[in-house]
Image (cartoon, coloured by chain):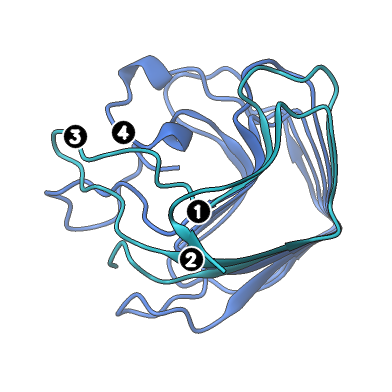
Chain colours: A cyan, B blue
Amino acid sequence: MTASLGQTVKVTSNKINFTSTPSGSSGIWLGDNSWSASSGYYPPAGSEKVHVSGNSIIDAANSILIGGGAKS
Amino acid sequence: MGSRQNQAGHNDKTPSSRFRGIQRGLGAVGPITYNTITGNFWTAYASDTNPQPQSDYSAGILLYGAGINASGAATKSTSVSKNTLSNNQMGVQVVDSDASVVKNAITESSPGIPDSIGSTDSAALPTAATSMPTTGTR
């Protein structure tokens, strides 16, 4: 299995509720490639197609994060 | 293979292994619907050397290479719908899988939870691995 599938992820009409807005929390975080290689581990290599619509997100520090690994 | 109307939960605070309520991995296919999944929590992240941030947390539903073939290409999309997830460190995580995450109810109350629905198209794989690791990936 490679680390560059090119996956498609659809996220629609979900209800997400963080009751206390925890620090650093994200309701939806897609396309995460925020890490880099370290000893013994490959770096992120893939990209993904994401579709996000109609979600309800309450009390998240970040409602929606679309990271550098995502492409529309 | 589908998972429908199950209850899974309270796999909490056990350092020896990372728990998921429901996991689909490495070619498995089938919808995940109408499940109630609570309290998946992993606390042994201090010993985790994987650089991927989400590797430190436990998910209510984890798709890891779900619906892929032997060459790593996606052949099936996994539906995750109408599930009720509460107090998992992460609600739904999608790694190297095609997925449709629709109409789920996710409630989180614990501090420090990174995300309720997350995805990445590149798990931080160990460079020397010849098979999928049992730890160090989300």
Instruction: Give a yes or no on whether discs 4 and 2 share a subunit.
Output: no
Q: In this orientation, does residue B91 appear? A: no
- Residue A48 — which label? 2
Q: How many numbered badges does the structure rendering display?
A: 4
Task: Tell me: B37 left or right of A51.
Answer: right
Type of the residue with mark 2: Glu
Dot 3 falls on a residue whose secondary structure is loop
Going from N to C along the chain, the mark reached first, 3 or 2, is: 3
* Whole-percent x, y for residue B94 in the image: 55, 55
Quick check: do tags 3 and 1 share a chain?
A: yes
- Measured along the vertical axis of the image, is residue A35 above or below residue A67? above
* Mark 2 neighbour class, 10 Å CA radius: few under 14, some 14 to 19, many 20 or more: many
* Dot 3 or dot 1, earlier in sequence: 1
Secondary structure beneath disc 1?
loop
Residue type at the position of mark 1: Gly
Mark 1 lies on residue? A31
Disc 3 marks which residue?
A: A38
Q: Which residue is drawn at 44% across and 62% down?
A: B96
C-alpha span from label 4 to label 3: 6 Å
Among the two numbered marks 2 and 1 on one chain, the one whose residue lies closer to the N terminus = 1
Q: Distance between the residues labelled 3 and 1?
A: 19 Å
Q: SS class of the residue under badge 4?
A: loop
- State the SS at label 2: strand
Residue B27: image location, x then y, percent: 46, 72
